[in-house]
Amino acid sequence: MTILLSPKKEKILPIVPLREGVLFPHVETILSFGRPVSVAAMEAAFKTDRLVCFLAQKDPRVSEPTEENLYQIGTLGKIERVLRTEGELHAWVKGFSRVRLESLEAVHPFMLGKVVELPEIQETSDKITALVNNLTKNFQEAVNLGKAVDVMMIMKLLGENTPSEVADQISYVLDLKTADKQALLETLSVKERLIRVNEFLAHELKVLELERAIDSKTKMKFDKSIRENILRERKRVIEEELGEVSEEQEEIKELKQKIKKAKMPLEVEKKAQKELKRLSSMNPNHPEFAYIRTYLDWLTEMPWSVSTPNKVSISQAAMILDEDHWGLEKVKERVIEYLAVMKLREKQKKEESKEEGPTILCFVGPPGVGKTSIGKSIARALGRRFVRVSLGGIRDEAEIRGHRRTYVGALPGRIIQGIRNAGTNNPVFMLDEIDKIGADFRGDPSAALLEALDPEQNREFSDHYLEVPFDLSRVMFITTANILDTIPPALRDRMEVIPFPGYTEVEKFHIAQKYLWNKQLVANGLKEDQIKIANEAIYEIIRRYTREAGVRELERCLATICRKLARKVAEGKKIPEIIKKTDIAKYLGPRKYSETLAEKKDEIGIATGLAYTEAGGDILFIEVALMPGRGNLLLTGKLGEVMKESGKAALSYVRSRWEQLGLKKDFYKNLDIHIHVPEGAVPKDGPSAGVAITVALVSALTKTPTRMDTGMTGEITLRGRVLEIGGVKEKVIAAHRAGLKRVILPKDNKKDLVDVPASVKKDIEFLFVSHLDDVLKLALRRKNGGN
């Protein structure tokens, strides 16, 4: 049954805005007012019939609200009591019914408005009863979970109340925004209001349950932690009384003994003792416990005072180097000198503060020439531990200096790790591929190496993880690189560069015969004396199956032969006692390279240049093609900027010498000149191809053949001067390997022939020049029968 209350008559009453919150009918509460307008309205109402209309503000920040800032539906309330304090008025008010503001009659000295009471839509049904019971039950549960509610409000709700009273009283105490409470106030249907209040209370009840659960868990953990600490302390006292030692105390005692045994420097020992003290007072379940324990392990396991005795015998060292390596005479000579100096310095008794660390050696050369193995031989000759760290591709500075201990999984840098693994403070430490270090947003590892590789600074090398200095002055550092160009100048300045040249054909033969063949026999399960390889067969492999500065490809070819022999042995088949030259093709397949790389006959517009690469020396052909055009110069073959500039300089020289060369003054205007260097996928750069480019260009323009038995190298100037170049030994060996009979070199490079093997020099005629005019006379074959 639905009952609609009839509306009452209009009334003119004082209007009091509520900055925050909403007053509901059937609610008694105390409200405080401080704004002059509100205080005046309350005082005026209290002197008359004590009736006031309370309207909620839409924006609580507005201090002087107008009709637009007030909700139109509010509550008619009666002032029961008033208490005045300094600047404020406190009133006990009671809400009666919902009213709507029809119009505002006055605003000064307080708001006065015409209001009309709004009827409620009520009904009596089982659903209403169920809603009221559920709302009352949930409210009691919320109070039990800790919801803050006035005691009088609780008592009133537990008494006899109509559905409308229950809905309004609980709406008032809900933790809702003003807009949500206003929406409940404006809901005239009691049934709908009960449903919405139930929803809001259910949500609030769920939040209270979560808060209670979180609080309970937190309190449980806190209580558990306190309980564990108390029990642990009691356990410690009991163990002390009984004379027993716990696992934690045993661990602390063990670390204390390690610190004492490590014989650290005084400052480092103080640091270790400080960290040990922190560890002993810390709960083993604390997150930092494991970090500090690991840190102390690193400190105690570093070889602070452990070193290998220096038993340097110069004759024995020389014997070991000769035993392990064939050739490399200059390299071995420099290493022996280094060891001799080290031996003499050990005998000198200088003050530690005045001593300098050993010189840092840098082995530079193409791959496969023995740089790393020489380092191992040095360690064997000194009787020291050998540590090798590859720096290729490292881009993070922390790889050298280590990570800060604040990071999870932090570790020292590779240098400190290598020293710890070696177990001594004076190992032979090889930093391999130092020219392949990169730099990015994580830092520059090469900059971090500056301190470690500076003999005057590495006495107190600082690793970010250890946080204490470590003396690297006794470590013998050796670095290796393929090229010097990519090593930063500051780092290069701290090292003594020892160049490793490519092997000659004779050196490769002796290396294969003495080392590689027996090594591969053993590696593939064969006996050293089970099978031999003929000298001619080794030369066949070197000449027809490999083209390299080192011996790695040569070793791979020998390994291939040994694998095929091993298969035959495993199958029970008979194998030859000696591998002959004629057998090589059967094992390695067809020949990969021709006997010589040089051209068979003289040609126009082509010249043979000599180049120096990471893999040693090589020859390259410079080709020139002339086409009708507009004077354009086209350079191809993946040339670098320097080599392109050499091509432009060559053309400028030819144009400046047009008359001497028998060319027309404007010969270039109707020509496009294309200079190409074959093997276009291989990058090429450097100034030493200038001579070959000029010869090929002059040959094409003058229709004069170039001598194909002649290789040439040298940088040129616009005036025709031929300047000194590098890599003479490697270039001459490449020319010899390619079958060239004559080599044109700059005059200033005559001194470099001392490094060229005698077996190579006897087969090649060397022509030294200082000007391009001399080059053209020697490199071009004239029609009159001259050169």
Image (spheres, rainbow, N blue to C red):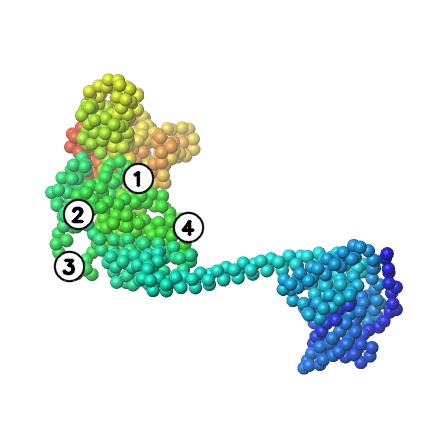
Q: Earlier in the sequence, mark 3 or mark 2?
A: 2
Can you see residue 781? no
> Alpha-carbon distance for marks 3 and 4?
44 Å
The amino acid beneath tag 2 is Tyr
Dot 3 crowding, Cα within 10 Å, few <14, some 14–19, many 20+: few
The amino acid beneath tag 1 is Pro
Pointer 4: what residue? 441
Residue 692 higher or lower than 588, as above or below: below
Q: Residue furthest left?
A: 315
Q: Residue at x 20, y 23 (%)?
A: 531
Q: What element does badge 4 sit on?
A: loop
Corner quadrant of residue 674: top left
Residue 524 percent location from the top left of the image: 26, 28
Pointer 2: what residue? 338
Pointer 3: what residue? 350
The amino acid beneath tag 4 is Phe
Residue 337 higher or lower than 738, as above or below: below
The amino acid beneath tag 3 is Lys
Pointer 1: what residue? 687
